[in-house]
């Protein structure tokens, strides 16, 4: 099975494709585990944050520059 480009998956998620969201989360799972410090609550929060951020993502802009910092500051 051919792996979709990240930009294609993001567009599919923004169009309501839940399978594309699952694929994105799987692709980012190593980072989720790393930054979630193997804490299920932190990992779940990161997954929800990724789903939210993908919906708000705007390509070819400076959008998102501070998204992760804002997420971390909420903790």
Image (spheres, rainbow, N blue to C red):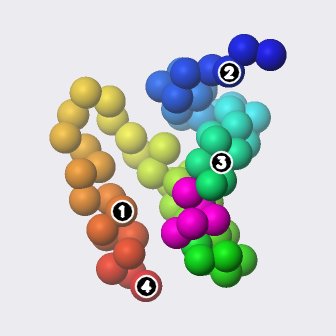
- Closest to the camera, between mark 2 and mark 3, is 2
Q: Which mark is residue 3?
A: 2
Residue beneath disc 1? 68
Whole-percent x and y of residue 27? 64, 42
Q: CA distance from mark 4 to mark 3?
A: 21 Å
Q: Residues within 10 Å of mark 2 (few under 14, many from 20)?
A: few
Q: For residue 69, what is the image quadrant?
A: bottom left
Relative placement, left or right, of 9 versus 53 is right
| Label 1 secondary element | helix
Give the magenta range: 31-35
- Closest to the camera, between mark 2 and mark 4, is 2
Residue beneath disc 3? 25
Choose the circle earlier in sequence order: 2 or 4.
Answer: 2
Q: Residue at 67% across / 80% down in the picture?
A: 39
Relative placement, left or right, of 5 versus 65 is right
| Label 2 secondary element | loop
Work out whether residue 31 or residue 61 is closer to the camera in this orientation and state it. Answer: 31
């Amino acid at each position: 099975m051919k792996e979709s480009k990240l930009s294609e998956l993001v567009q599919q998620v923004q169009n309501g494709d839940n399978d594309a969201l699952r694929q994105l989360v799987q692709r980012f799972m190593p980072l989720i585990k790393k930054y979630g410090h193997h804490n299920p609550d932190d990992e779940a929060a990161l997954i929800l944050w990724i789903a939210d951020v993908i919906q708000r993502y705007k390509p070819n802009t400076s959008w998102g520059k501070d998204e992760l910092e804002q997420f971390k500051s909420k903790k």
